Image (cartoon, coloured by chain):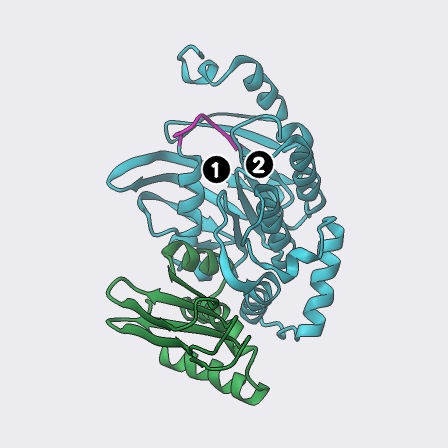
């Protein structure tokens, strides 16, 4: 990343404090993400990983107490959730919800057209959209049947996770946050998710991957790994940090012996 | 629905949407006459609630005078959840877009049976009457 200093960051988080239901979870997060980078955020349960994702996308359950977040030069915390999405912020949910009766195809077309409208581009008509969607699904090696079914309805865990990644591929966000894209997956589905994510790496966008285990990271090769403990990033490094954590356990960074 | 002849079949699908302080009630009579051997009825009432101050009620009435008839009744109630709305917002849709999508999904089964001109009108009518129901 030798040219890091000469470019503008996609995301800059400074001294972010946030609470949920009156309990402070984030105690001063600092993180800067540049275009082209893949960052992994690891940490034990309850360390604030999902809270960080929720705060960034503006989920109403979280309240920011202090700090600032600059996203592509704009004050992210002032924007409504849908404005953040249209500006190019995407979250692959840990537990994607079902939308019964709403086909994946019509849902994604409505979403893409909102985003295109925001960027001053023409809306895609159904025929143009379907060919785009087919092309993206084929690249991710995804069964086309998923497009005709209702969003996430009756999907297996793996199908839900991969449907999130399909949406990411279609909406082309500047920053994609993936909240535990590996949870509940068997090893084959995990490899597929990892190779899908790798294929979506682009020089002008970034990925922030939240994960509990090192397993996913051995396929993804992140540029940076951060360890979140008690709402603070306690250590950052390259991907070798993830391997070290796997061997020594989180106790190594939290100062408590691992069980 | 009145069945008089042998082996007659019928389906009733009711979709009710309640928003704000609205209450929606389904009342339906399925009557099977004494000569309606092997008659068959299937009834389903689906209700969608928008907000937490509305309600849906179902009062099915079945009168059967023929013991070979098969009559089924099913009822479901679902609610547009905050999680569903937030999921749509996170994809760049407005709250109104999100409600419209979910409501249209709920009614799809009925709307797709309508002639195209009616279907378009029905969809627009739904959008107008639900404007501002969530927010």
Instruction: Name the residue that disc number 2 marks.
Output: A39
Q: Is residue A28 above or below residue B37?
A: above
The image's mark for residue A167 is none
Q: Give the percent coordinates (x, y) of residue A208.
A: 55, 41
Chain identifier of the residue bearing label 1 in the image: A
If you read the primary sequence from the N terminus, does the residue marked by circle 2 or circle 1 appear first?
1
- Asked if the residues shown at circle 2 and circle 1 are in contact, with their CB atoms under 8 angstroms apart, the answer is yes
| Rendered-image quadrant of the N terminus of chain A | top right
Q: Residue furthest bottom?
A: B117
Q: Is residue A252 above or below residue A128?
A: above
Q: CA distance from mark 2 to mark 1?
A: 10 Å
Which color is chain B depicted in? green
Disc 2 on helix, strand or loop? Answer: strand
| Rendered-image quadrant of the C terminus of chain A | top left
Chain identifier of the residue bearing label 2 in the image: A
From the viewer's perspective, tell me whether residue A212 is left or right of residue A129: left
Q: Residue at x 43, y 71 (%)?
A: B66
Range of magenta residues: A41-47
Membership of A240 in magenta stretch:
no
Which color is chain A depicted in? cyan
Q: Is residue A235 visible?
A: yes
From the viewer's perspective, tell me whether residue B101 is left or right of residue A201: left
From the viewer's perspective, tell me whether residue A144 is left or right of residue B34: right
Query: Are the residues under badges 2 and 1 in a single subunit?
Result: yes
Q: Residue at x 57, y 86 (%)?
A: B115
Q: Is residue A7 visible?
A: no
Q: Give the percent coordinates (x, y) of residue A203.
A: 68, 47
Instruction: Name the residue that disc number 1 marks.
Output: A31
Disc 1 on helix, strand or loop? Answer: strand
Q: Which quarter of the figure has residue A217?
A: top right
């Amino acid at each position: 990343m030798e040219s890091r200093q000469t470019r503008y960051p996609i995301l800059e988080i400074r001294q972010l404090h946030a609470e949920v239901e009156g309990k402070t979870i984030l105690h001063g997060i600092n993180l800067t993400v540049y275009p082209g980078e893949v960052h992994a955020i690891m940490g034990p349960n309850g360390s604030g990983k999902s809270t960080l994702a929720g705060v960034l996308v503006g989920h109403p359950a979280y309240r920011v107490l202090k700090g600032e977040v600059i996203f592509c030069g704009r004050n992210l915390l002032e924007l409504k959730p849908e404005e953040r999405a249209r500006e190019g912020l995407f979250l692959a949910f840990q537990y994607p919800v079902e939308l019964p009766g709403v086909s994946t195809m019509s849902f994604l077309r409505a979403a893409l057209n909102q985003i295109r409208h925001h960027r001053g581009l023409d809306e895609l008509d159904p025929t143009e959209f379907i060919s785009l969607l087919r092309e993206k699904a084929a690249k991710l090696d995804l069964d086309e049947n998923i497009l005709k079914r209702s969003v996430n309805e009756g999907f297996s865990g793996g199908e839900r996770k991969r449907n999130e990644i399909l949406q990411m591929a279609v909406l082309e966000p500047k920053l994609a946050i993936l909240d535990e894209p590996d949870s509940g997956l068997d090893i084959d589905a995990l490899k597929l998710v990892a190779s899908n994510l790798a294929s979506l790496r682009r020089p002008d966008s970034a990925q922030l991957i939240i994960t509990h285990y090192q397993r996913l990271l051995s396929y993804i090769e992140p540029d940076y790994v951060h360890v979140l403990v008690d709402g603070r990033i306690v250590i950052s490094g390259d991907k070798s940090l993830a391997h070290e954590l796997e061997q020594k356990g989180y106790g190594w960074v939290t100062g408590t012996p691992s069980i | 629905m009145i069945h008089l002849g042998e082996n007659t079949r019928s389906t009733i699908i009711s979709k009710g949407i309640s928003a704000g302080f609205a209450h929606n009630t389904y009342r339906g009579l399925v009557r099977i006459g004494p000569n309606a051997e092997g008659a068959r009825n299937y009834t389903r009432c689906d209700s969608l609630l928008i907000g937490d101050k509305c309600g849906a009620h179902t009062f099915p009435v079945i009168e059967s005078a023929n013991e070979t008839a098969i009559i089924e009744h099913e009822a479901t109630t679902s609610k547009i959840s905050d999680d569903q709305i937030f999921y749509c917002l996170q994809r760049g849709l407005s709250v109104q877009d999100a409600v419209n999508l979910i409501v249209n999904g709920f009614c799809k089964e009925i709307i797709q049976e309508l002639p195209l001109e009616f279907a378009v009108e029905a969809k627009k009518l739904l959008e107008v009457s639900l404007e501002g129901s969530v927010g």
